[in-house]
Amino acid sequence: MPYAGEWILGVAFFSFTALVIASYIFEIKTQGNDDIGITTEVALILTFSLGAWAALGFQMEALGSAVATIALLSLKPVLHDWLQRIDVEVIYAGIKLLIISVIMLPLLPNQGYGPWETLNPYWIWWMVVLISGLSFLGYILVKYAGEGKGTLLTAVIGGLASSTAVTVSLAQFAKQKAQSRARI
């Protein structure tokens, strides 16, 4: 027999969410300001969800998520300032990295092919993700920390993961820098 509490919890969640949305719409109409954030509303829904998660027996997970949420909310001014300085190209590059790592990587078979089963598509693509991630990290660090500090930080962080990937990534970065300087 199915547990009836799950249905009640689902109905309560959707009812609460509808109430929060209605309150948000009312607030927009009464204030007449189109630039109203949704931080409070998201925090309300997240608080309800974490309470439900804890009530279902996942107290430690809910507590950890609550601590992470509090940390993010306390950094809201810093995050807003940081987000205003991000270029659209960086956001698109991050989305592409997420696509190759979160969507494509799990779809590849994790088994060997070819002679002695040496070609494993999953691990080959994992190297692509690692090198792309290091290149992206290097680009971000150089752009926002400066060329000297950014290159050094990229090398140190990447060297902890894979020295080969760092070498390939920094070689690609140096080649791009040389080409951009040649155009100037």
Image: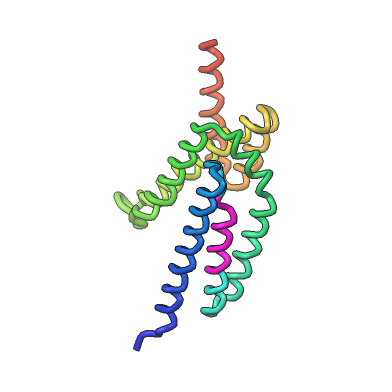
Which residue lies at the image location 55% right of the left edge and 75% below the top edge? 58
Which residue lies at the image location 55% right of the left edge and 21% below the top edge? 177
Along the line of sight, the residue nearer the viewer: 119 or 142: 142
Where is residue 108? Give x, y as percent. Answer: 34, 53
Quadrant in the picture for the N terminus: bottom left
Q: Is residue 168 above or below residue 55?
A: above
* Rendering colour mode: rainbow
Residue 171 falls in image quadrant: top right
In screen coordinates, is 140 left or right of 122? right
Where is residue 77? Give x, y as percent. Answer: 68, 45
Along the line of sight, the residue nearer the viewer: 69 or 31: 31
Along the line of sight, the residue nearer the viewer: 119 or 12: 12
Residue 68 falls in image quadrant: bottom right
Q: Is residue 90 above or below residue 174?
A: below
- Give the extent of the magenta segment: 38-49
Q: Is residue 86 above or below residue 159?
A: above
Question: Is residue 42 inside the magenta stretch?
Answer: yes
Question: Is residue 119 inside the magenta stretch?
Answer: no
Where is residue 78? Give x, y as percent. Answer: 68, 44
Where is residue 111? Give x, y as percent. Answer: 34, 57
Which residue lies at the image location 54% right of the left edge and 52% below the top edge? 27
**Main SS of the magenta segment?**
helix
Quadrant in the picture for the C terminus: top right
